[in-house]
Image (cartoon, grey):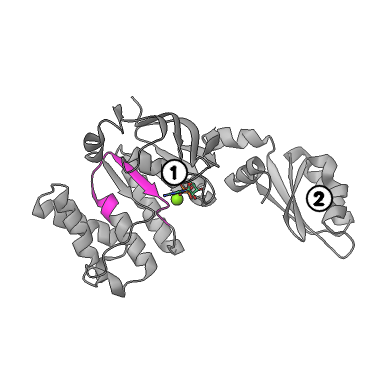
Amino acid sequence: MFAIESLNVSKLYKGSNKKALDDVSLKIERGKISTILGRNGAGKTTFVRICSTQLLPSSGKILVFGDDVVYSPEKIRKIISIVPQEGRPLRALTPWDHIYNWLKIRGESNSSATRKTCDILNRLDLYSAKDIPVLNLSGGMKQKILVGMAMATESPLLFLDEPTIGLDPVSRRQVWSIIKDWKNKGRTIVLTTHYMDEAELLSDSIFILDKGKVISKGNMTDLRNTLNYQIRVDIHESSKYNNTGIKDLFSSFGKIINISSDSIRLFTFETNLQEISKLAMNTNLSFAVSPITLDDIFVNLLGGK
Ligand SMILES: Nc1ncnc2c1ncn2[C@@H]1O[C@H](COP(=O)(O)OP(=O)(O)O)[C@@H](O)[C@H]1O
Ligand SMILES: [Mg+2]
């Protein structure tokens, strides 16, 4: 059985004339990290809200561990935790209150709630701020409280809707490390993000959502293969050659896209590298070579930035 099966799910919000989700069919495996990747407005939050029984689909069907979100919401709510995108912790309460009370509501004993609250506060580097009211905490710390609440529970299925938004690089890594530990304990994680590095680092499978539709899916290797090229070369314009001039010089080596007003990106094969370097050096153009990233795949699928 899959953790989540979405069958031809569409969502049209009242008063809107554009589908937020348009015929989404996908299967999310148990015990894995699955990422829904997409730009703002792609439909990520809508999908998560339907899966977590906060919103009804307009049509189609979603099963969570075999149960229908429309007919068995109570049963599903017991086995999921969510870091909601629109969540805000309460101003007068402390990080400790939020996490401890949440665990108590979920039925944990006092001692287990205390132990788990300490553990997660430490892991998120929030322990020293545990008794400070939320109104005196930074935006990043507030976000970490929401992450901590969901992550402190032992729910087999966790929804993380852009969990690292607004977090500094160290905090992001702390959250990533907890996500990986969760997976190692056999839990299922559904992550949404628009951060390519996060998706690339954590995901067992990725679903790229755009304008409510799944436009690509697979693991990193599958997605890399959709691009067909092995490396990228960024070439910067010079006094002699502008972007158009560079394109003319290099177009025979692969696919070229504009990435900024003064440089282009060439997707190509390793076997072309020697010739490309020679040409760049002969024409005095500076360039940088790197492997294809998820960002490239994304830009390629969506047709340039
Ligand atoms: N409550 C709502 N009412 C009407 N339209 C909405 C509502 N929530 C989201 N939308 C629209 O649905 C689309 C998908 O939004 P959302 O699921 O929030 O995308 P994402 O999380 O990927 O940024 C957007 O066009 C958004 O404007
Ligand atoms: Mg969202």
Q: Which percent across, then down, holds residue 35?
A: 45, 42
State the residue at coordinates (34%, 60%). 144
Which quarter of the picture shows residue 143?
bottom left
Q: Is residue 56 above or below residue 8?
A: below
- For this view, does 220 lie left or right of residue 277? left
Q: Amino acid at mark 1?
A: Tyr
Which residues make up the magenta segment? 149-164
User: Which is more foreground, mark 1 or mark 2?
Assistant: 1
- For this view, does 175 lie left or right of residue 262? left
* Label 1 beta carbon within 8 A of ligand 1: yes
Q: Is residue 212 above or below residue 145?
A: above
Q: Secondary structure at mark 1?
A: loop
Residues marked 1 and 2 touching at CB (< 8 Å): no
Q: Which percent across, then down, holds residue 12?
A: 46, 40
Q: Which residue is mark 2?
A: 277
Q: Which percent across, then down, holds residue 109?
A: 9, 50
Which quarter of the picture shows residue 302?
top right
Mark 2 or mark 1, which is nearer the start of the sequence? 1
Quarter of the image for the N terminus: give it. top left
Q: Which mark is residue 52?
A: none
Q: Which mark is residue 13?
A: 1
* Label 2 beta carbon within 8 A of ligand 1: no
Q: CA distance from mark 1 to mark 2?
A: 52 Å
User: Who is closer to the viewer here, 62 or 126?
Assistant: 62
Q: Amino acid at mark 2?
A: Ser
Residue lying at the far front of the rendered structure: 15
State the residue at coordinates (58%, 45%). 294
Q: Residues within 10 Å of mark 1 (few under 14, many from 20)?
A: some
Q: Residues within 10 Å of mark 2 (few under 14, many from 20)?
A: some
User: Who is closer to the viewer here, 155 or 15?
Assistant: 15
- For this view, does 271 lie left or right of residue 158? right
Tell me, yes or no, if residue 141 can be seen here: yes
